[in-house]
């Protein structure tokens, strides 16, 4: 007779979180709960249980771990999701639950890249007027207000969901899309819209890297919002490595 299920929590919202849940769904006796913040309207859903919405801070997350008898937590959130990562550090330590961070590799500058790295969207906005007038803006909806006061500039704004209200930007067009993006499609987008500068988060990983190659080929600058530092703890770079870590933990 099979033993009781072992429950794992994946803090998700990324392709890596979905890939890990897909791998774990093949393992008998393992129950996966993926948690999403609930920001996107039609998220790519992983197999297993999915819960949506915040936990209510560190204490809420710690309470969830205890109530649901969670044995392991994988923080597979986006590199720019720092609050939930910090909450996971504290809640897992308090609840005595092992935590693994699944962090996709950072991008590395290549010959020909014209990257200008900045701390945040406000810094990107203040540099922008000296760098270009036709901007491909791929920083997510929450960072857009930083660009609202910039005149004489046109923005091509890539978003996952259509905005609920008009954007507070000088002039713009919206292109909807969710990675992965191909090099061919990124080249076409830059050329068709006569883009002369790209603004992006230094998210890392493969799914959104093609725009950097397209910008290098077009010899245009990229203003990159620096990746925030998360407390590292035990960290792996791929879903396969996270899977191996989990299997070893469950067997020990
Ligand atoms: P954040 O600033 O680190 O988190 C803000 C609050 O949102 C957290 O304190 C937590 O609320 C809630 N939250 C965040 N991720 C959650 C999750 N996976 N499950 C349950 N609650 C979560 O996060 P964010 O940057 O807004 O990102 C939100 C989500 O979108 C994350 O899951 C992330 O993986 C995904 N995402 C983010 C980006 C980005 O650029 N930031 C890009 C792509 C995907 P409580 O304190 O109430 O628990």
Image (cartoon, grey):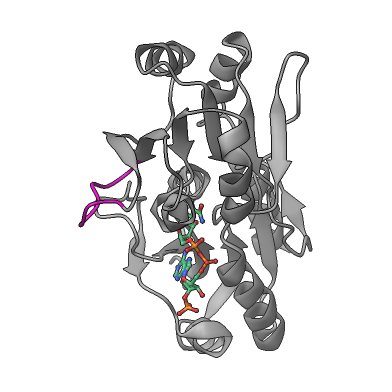
The question of residue 162 being in magenta is answered with yes
Residue at image position (44%, 47%) is: 18
Q: Nearer the viewer, residue 126 or 143?
A: 126
In the figure, is residue 125 to the left or right of 54?
Answer: right
Task: Please identify the quarter of the rendering in which residue 249 is found.
Answer: bottom right
Q: Position of residue 148 (x, y in %)?
A: 41, 52
Q: Quadrant of the C terminus?
A: bottom right
Q: Nearer the viewer, residue 248 or 124?
A: 124
Residue 95 sits above or below residue 152 on the image? below
Seen as rendered, the residue at the extreme front is 152
Q: Which residues are magenta?
A: 159-167
Q: Is residue 102 visible to us here?
A: yes
Residue at image position (36%, 72%) is: 53
Task: Please identify the quarter of the rendering in which residue 239 is found.
Answer: top right
Residue at image position (35%, 47%) is: 169
Q: Position of residue 54 (x, y in %)?
A: 42, 76
Residue 171 sits above or below residue 103 on the image? above
The question of residue 32 being in magenta is answered with no
Residue 239 sits above or below residue 64 on the image? above
Q: Is residue 61 visible to us here?
A: no
Q: Quadrant of the N terminus?
A: bottom left
Query: Magenta region, mostly helix, strand or loop?
Result: loop
Q: Position of residue 193 (x, y in %)?
A: 36, 18
């Amino acid at each position: 007779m099979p033993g009781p299920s072992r429950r794992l929590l994946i803090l998700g919202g990324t392709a890596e979180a979905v890939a890990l849940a897909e791998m774990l769904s093949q393992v008998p006796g393992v129950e996966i709960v993926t948690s999403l913040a609930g920001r996107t309207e039609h998220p790519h859903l992983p197999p297993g249980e999915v819960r949506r919405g915040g936990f209510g801070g560190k204490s809420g997350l710690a309470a969830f771990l205890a109530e649901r008898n969670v044995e392991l937590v994988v923080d597979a959130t986006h590199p720019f999701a720092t609050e939930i990562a910090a909450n996971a550090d504290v809640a897992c330590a308090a609840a005595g639950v092992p935590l693994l961070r699944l962090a996709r590799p950072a991008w590395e500058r290549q010959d020909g890249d014209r990257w200008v790295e900045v701390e945040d969207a406000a810094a990107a906005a203040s540099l922008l007027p000296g760098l270009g007038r036709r901007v491909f803006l791929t920083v997510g909806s929450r960072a857009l207000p930083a660009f609202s006061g910039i005149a004489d500039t046109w923005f091509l704004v890539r978003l996952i969901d259509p905005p609920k209200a008009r954007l507070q930007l000088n002039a713009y067009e919206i292109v909807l899309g969710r990675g992965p993006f191909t090099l061919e499609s990124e080249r076409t987008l830059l050329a068709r819209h006569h883009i002369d500068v790209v603004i992006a988060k230094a998210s890392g990983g493969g799914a959104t890297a093609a725009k950097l190659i397209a910008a290098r080929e077009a010899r245009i600058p990229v203003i990159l919002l620096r990746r925030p530092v998360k407390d590292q703890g035990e960290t792996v770079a791929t879903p396969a490595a996270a899977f191996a870590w989990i299997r070893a933990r469950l067997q020990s």
